[in-house]
Image (cartoon, grey):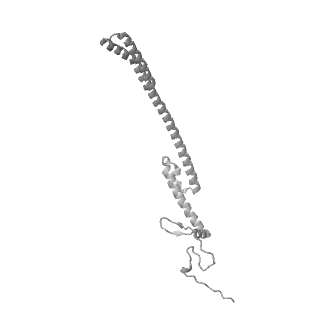
Amino acid sequence: MELVKIQIWSPDEVNSLGGFQGFGTSPEVPVAPTRDLQTGFRVSPDYIRDLMVDPQVKAHLESAIEERTKKGLVAILRSFSLEEKDSPLQENLESLTVSELEGELHQLEEGLTRQWSERMAALGVQKETLETAWDKIIQNWSQERSDLLKSHERKWCETLGHVVRKACLTNFQGRLEDLENWLQRNVSEFIENES
């Protein structure tokens, strides 16, 4: 009969990865541990992988993940489906599976995308309408200003002629024609430059 040597390991002989230091000659491989930011608790990825080998632990962990995912999806659907509060879907969200909730979320996303596209198209049409109206206002204002200057051009020439006659300048008829020509030329140039 062979005697089997039983080794009892002390906590000092367990390394940071949960392995025994006296086991094997391979050096310790540094692993970036996963960390829960709320508690500061660290778990090695190897530890989680080893736990997932056990079917009960795996089923429990997958169930917890699915439950948490389901709660998140239900919260998202409830927060964005405000218009459809009375729909039977809103009342039965908890009874749906995660894949059904993902389908509902996909439909909600498509609906929101369609609404956004319609609103942006409406805003684009509204913007074009406003720009067209603004261009028309500016064009009308420029035309009225130009018409006003042209309509008063003759009056300005007549007024200047009247002032020249009152001043009794010699040879005022020739000077009056020169002034009228100068005014007509300069006012016309002014109108062309301003347009």
Q: Position of residue 22 (x, y in %)?
A: 60, 80
The one of 101 and 92 positioned closer to us in this rendering:
101
Q: Is residue 26 left or right of residue 126?
A: right
In this rendering, would 120 be left or right of 24? left
Q: In the image, what residue occupies the spot 35% across and 13% down?
A: 161
Give coordinates of residue 138: x percent, y percent.
44, 28
Residue 62 shows up from this direction: yes
Pick out the residue farthest to the left: 167
Left or right of residue 134: residue 172 = left
At x 46% / y 26%, what residue is drawn?
A: 139
Residue closest to the far bottom: 1
Residue 109 in the image: state x and y as whole percent. Answer: 55, 48
Query: What residue is at 55 percent from the left and 56 percent from the top?
Result: 95
Quarter of the image containing the C terminus?
top left
The image quadrant that residue 114 belongs to is top right
Q: Residue furthest right?
A: 1
Q: Is residue 195 visible?
A: no
Q: Position of residue 86 (x, y in %)?
A: 49, 48
7 relative to 108, above or below: below
Please tell me which residue lies in front, 115 or 150: 150
Quadrant into which the N terminus falls: bottom right
Position of 119 with respect to 26 (left or right) is: left
- What is the number of callouts on the image? 0
